Amino acid sequence: MNNNYPQNEFGYFINKIPTNPPNNDDGGKRKPNKKPKVSNKKLENLTNLGNPNLPSPPKDIHFLSIIGQIEGHIVSPPQKKATKYEHIMPQLLAVERDPNIKGLLVILNTVGGDVEAGLALSEMINSISKPKVSLVLGGGHSIGIPLATSADYSFIVPTASMTLHPVRMKGLVIGVPQTFRYFQKMQQRILNFILRTSRIEKEKLQSLMYATDEIANDVGTILIGEEAVNSGLIHEVGGLNSAIDKLNSMINSNKEA
């Protein structure tokens, strides 16, 4: 009978199994199981993006993505993807003021949206003093066209499309001459910006915008890939690598100047 086991008050042996069995590798001392620590940043990436580890790109280029509908003064429905212009403005301000940021890459996949907000962002991008390149992925429609032309150099992937059409307004419209003149002024603001920031000619732009044989239920023209380049809206057909290479060359030229 093994007397090493403890006895209770009735004389019965208690078969006590140690809760921490000895470990031969650590001299009989059991090391507690430590749970791996997960940083708050990784938890945030996992929650928001579904990716626990995101690569850290170089800090000399700021990547700005404008996707879905461009939201202005009216909040978009919750089921729609939207880019809020008040979220983009501080980023553009940081690009201009941060000495560590040498260039801006704007990635577009937007259906358009608020004209006032889109033009405001376009003017801000265009007025940044540092090199800036835009890349149209998927679509750069409606007010997304000024956003694409606002950069110093623009790219479009072969399958991306851009839709040119006149200004449209939802809701109640008062049928008076003042309303028509308001639409004309708003349309002219968009035309003037596109003409100022791209190589397209005025007659060509107007003919594409007011075409009636391209879209079944609307007025305008859809340009795909090379067509946008041939019209003069976009500089070149290319992807992400082309856009980054061009931006890097512009940054290097800016340093040498």
Image (tube, rainbow, N blue to C red):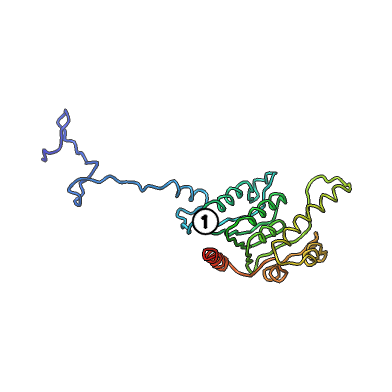
The C terminus appears in which quarter of the rendering? Answer: bottom right
Could you say whether the residue bearing mark 1 is in a helix, strand or loop?
loop
Horizontal relation, residue 148 to residue 256: left or right: right
Which one is in front, 97 or 38?
Answer: 97
Q: Position of residue 120 (x, y in %)?
A: 68, 51
**Looking at the picture, does residue 165 appear above or below residue 40?**
below
Q: In percent of the image, x 63 and y 59: which residue is there?
A: 108
User: Hey, which quadrant is residue 195 in on the image?
Assistant: bottom right
**Would you say 43 lies left or right of 236 here?**
left
The residue wearing badge 1 is: 101
Q: Position of residue 161 (x, y in %)?
A: 68, 64
Q: Across the whole image, how many numbered discs are drawn on residues?
A: 1
User: Label 1 crowding class (10 Å Cα cut-off): few <14, some 14-19, many 20+?
Assistant: some
Left or right: residue 234 versus residue 6 is: right
Residue at 63 percent across and 70 percent down: it is 237
Q: Residue furthest right?
A: 176
Looking at the rendering, in which quadrant would you find the N terminus? top left
Q: Tell which residue pokes out farthest to the front in this image.
A: 257
**Residue 193 location, x and y as percent?**
72, 58
Three-letter code, disc 1? Ile
Whole-percent x, y for residue 168 in the image: 78, 53
Task: Name the residue at the top extreme.
Answer: 9
Task: Specify whether 17 is left or right of 138.
Answer: left
* Residue 131 location, quadrant: bottom right
Give the vertical position of 230 relative to 36 (above or below).
below
